[in-house]
Amino acid sequence: MRILSNSATSGRAIATGLVVAALVATLAALLLPVQLFGETAAAATTTLTYDDDGGGTVTTRYGPLTAMDRDFVRKVKLAGLWELPSGRMAQQRGTTAAVRTAGNHLVAGHTELDQRSNEAGRALGIDLPTEPNVAQQGWLGQLKAAQGKEFDATLAELLRRAHGKVFGLVALVRDQTKNTMVRALADRANDVVLDHITVLEKTGRVDFNTLHHS
């Protein structure tokens, strides 16, 4: 029988210790990004909410349709009811080329999403809003009252904040929906919302210090 020397035994112990240390370091690195956000992964997925209409999940030819799916389609339609007129105001009243360009993108994007949400509503039997809600009417009122550079700043702030809030819901629906028509709408909405966020930021009138404080 071969007897290992003390040096060989120590060498193996050190090697084993290094392997264990490496595994621990790797596990810590994997967990670190989650902890940096101050939440567990499970908690992070529950921060977004949707309006439950109480209709439960129903079967459609495009797959199951949940309350979250219906709320998403309604919110896409609702967004267009105030963001389309906001875009038209930006086209006509923006004092810079960047603001007018943002208006062009708003009009084009929400014209398309409005048509797609109408199609989804008809195909899936979802009742859709026909006018802006109270908050949106207030935002339109602010835009109508603003003049000159104040209009540019008001448009950028209101529209950038609105798009930032809905962006998370778009991602959630795209990830979780089992309905092919809703998924297609979420796919396109993701592209449009990101484009609008980008062009609004390019106006140079978005104040990131106050963006998430109201």
Image: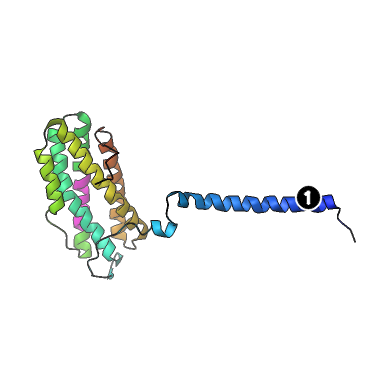
| Residue 104 appears in the picture as rendered | no
Give residue 72's quadrant in the image: bottom left
Majority secondary structure in the magenta region = helix
Residues drawn in magenta: 109-119
Q: Is residue 37 magenta?
A: no
Most distant residue in the top direction: 96
Q: How is the image coloured?
A: rainbow
Q: Is residue 114 magenta?
A: yes
Q: Residue at x 20, y 63 (%)?
A: 126
8 and 186: which is toward the camera:
8
Q: Tell me if residue 144 comes above or below residue 75 in the rendering.
A: above
**In x, y percent, where is residue 166?**
27, 51
Give residue 63's quadrant in the image: bottom left
**In x, y percent, where is residue 88?**
14, 40
Q: Residue at x 52, y 51 (%)?
A: 30
140 and 98: which is toward the camera:
140
**Mark 1 lies on residue:** 11
Inspect the image, locate mark 1, and give the three-letter code of the amino acid beneath it.
Answer: Gly
